[in-house]
Image (cartoon, rainbow, N blue to C red):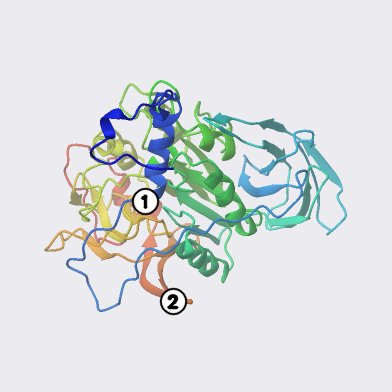
């Protein structure tokens, strides 16, 4: 193909210009997202001499099974004593059923579920299956087969009582750093995986949703993965796809109905003495919204004698001393912080900012021993790189901060104590960089003298223990 020179470009005529194709601008936008990802900020105010590595290449996991075999298999909690198994097949005639049992190759039970699919511009998804199985015994390994085809998988159900260990990773993506993070997570056992938003970083490139599902399958098929949405899951497009979350809602079905929610974008669940709340940063959250009213009702139902620990996850952090995404969670904080404070929520995890930061207990921008501990952990391995610039000097409420990839572990030992550790990705080995023991607010009696004070005044306690 020859291109016109500056002298004859006025004579060039095209009978069917490509930009008149109705799909041209959607495709242009999609290619822009994929080919020109955001780059990290310049380094400033780093805390130590650890050399931070740049972003790594995107990992595209290939499809190596037959069209009827399950791929992208992942498990999630689906109410007391139940799990949901989700997977995709290229073949449309595969049944949405799961055979399972406690002995490999011997399936004593079978459950039938539902399926869905979706279209996004020129892309058509495979058949997406969701099957709820149970009742299941706690702390038990089950073997299962999806759709009557393909390989056998296995998962272990969480324990019924303490101790329980959560892995927390935000902004995971699918890069070489992601693979490193998941390898480090897999090096030590855990019970439940919590992901506060930004899963695949597909950003409208729908085949990357498939690749992400295949990348995480070895991990997500063996332990329940509980996720909430981030900004990279929105994938709206004016007029054509105005509502967003098309791929996310189809692929990552969470137990919202089981928790009384009307949206897959926010829900809650109980596991081993812990009540976990997954909030939606990118759906309505003001006082008149469905999410606000659901949260208010959900918190009223919490019985701290049965679930002494209450933990919340959301994507855009309410507290953040990094210059990246500064203030983006502020409107949600102003709308909902009082609800979490009055309920004496113990910990709030967030993602979005590609760094790690742990705060002391806070309420209304001030240290408060009856407020939650806030932790930002948006450092799973995304393709955009790290957010390197923090405020200087460090505010007193920020206890530890570092722009590195990694993952966190919350081991709830009993009704009063939990051990939090953050593990930095350091070459082939994870390095424990931040550790703290947390005390549940359930046993801090002075925090329950008056749970209605939301005027910004600090609750009085004898000692400020995290």
Q: Secondary structure at mark 2?
A: loop
**Percent of width and height locating residue 96:** 76, 36
Q: Which residue: 25% across, 79% down?
A: 49
Can you see residue 280?
A: no
Name the residue tied to disc 1. Answer: 351
Taking the image as shown, residue 454 lies to the left or right of residue 257, namely: left
Q: Which residue: 21% across, 66% down?
A: 43
Q: Which residue: 39% across, 43% down?
A: 2
Q: Secondary structure at mark 1?
A: loop
- Residue 196, relative to residue 104: is it above or below? above
Taking the image as shown, residue 113 lies to the left or right of residue 50, namely: right
Taking the image as shown, residue 329 lies to the left or right of residue 270, namely: left
**Percent of width and height locating residue 421:** 41, 67
* CA neighbours of label 2 inside 10 A, class few (<14), some (14 to 19), many (20+): few
Label 2–label 1 contact, CB within 8 A: no
> Closer to the camera, 193 or 298?
193
* CA distance separating discs 2 and 1: 22 Å
> Residue 427, which numbered label?
2
Q: Quadrant of residue 142?
A: bottom right
């Amino acid at each position: 193909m020859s291109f016109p020179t500056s002298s004859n470009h006025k004579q060039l005529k095209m009978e069917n210009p490509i930009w008149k194709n109705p799909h041209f601008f959607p495709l242009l936008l999609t290619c822009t997202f994929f080919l020109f990802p955001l780059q990290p900020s310049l380094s400033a105010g780093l805390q130590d001499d650890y050399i931070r590595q740049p972003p790594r290449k995107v990992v595209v996991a290939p499809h190596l099974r037959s069209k009827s075999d399950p791929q992208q298999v992942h498990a999630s909690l689906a109410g007391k004593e139940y799990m949901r198994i989700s997977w995709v097949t290229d073949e449309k005639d595969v049944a949405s059923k799961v055979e399972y049992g406690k002995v490999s190759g011997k399936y004593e039970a079978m459950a039938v579920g539902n399926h869905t699919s979706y279209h996004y511009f020129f892309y058509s998804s495979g058949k997406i299956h969701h099957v709820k199985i149970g009742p299941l015994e706690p702390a038990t390994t089950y073997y299962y087969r999806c759709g009557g085809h393909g390989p056998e998988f296995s998962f272990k159900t969480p324990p019924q009582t303490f101790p329980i260990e959560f892995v927390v990773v935000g902004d995971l993506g699918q890069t070489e750093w992601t693979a490193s993070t998941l390898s480090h997570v897999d090096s030590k056992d855990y019970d439940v995986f919590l992901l506060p938003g930004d899963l695949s970083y597909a950003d409208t490139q729908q085949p990357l949703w498939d690749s992400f599902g295949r990348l995480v399958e070895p991990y997500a098929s063996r332990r329940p993965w509980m996720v909430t949405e981030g900004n990279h899951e929105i994938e709206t497009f004016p007029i054509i796809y105005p509502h967003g979350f098309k791929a996310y809602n189809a692929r990552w079905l969470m137990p919202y109905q089981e928790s009384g929610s009307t949206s897959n974008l926010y829900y809650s669940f109980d596991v081993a003495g812990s009540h976990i709340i997954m909030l939606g940063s990118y759906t309505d959250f003001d006082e008149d919204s469905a999410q606000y009213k659901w949260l208010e009702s959900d918190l009223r139902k919490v019985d701290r004698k049965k679930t002494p620990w209450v933990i919340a996850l959301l994507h855009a952090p309410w507290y953040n001393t990094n210059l990246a995404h500064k203030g983006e969670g502020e409107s949600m904080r102003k709308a909902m912080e009082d609800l979490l404070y009055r309920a004496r929520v113990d910990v709030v995890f967030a993602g979005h900012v590609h760094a790690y930061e742990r705060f002391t207990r806070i309420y209304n921008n001030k240290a408060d021993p009856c407020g939650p501990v806030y932790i930002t952990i948006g450092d799973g391995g995304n393709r955009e790189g790290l957010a390197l610039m923090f405020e200087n000097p460090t505010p007193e409420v920020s206890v530890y901060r570092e722009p590195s990839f990694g993952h966190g572990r919350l081991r709830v030992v009993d009704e009063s104590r939990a051990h939090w550790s953050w593990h930095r990705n350091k070459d082939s080995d994870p390095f424990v960089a931040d550790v703290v023991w947390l005390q549940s607010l359930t046993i801090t009696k002075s925090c329950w003298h008056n749970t209605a004070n939301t005027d910004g005044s600090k609750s009085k306690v004898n000692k400020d223990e995290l």
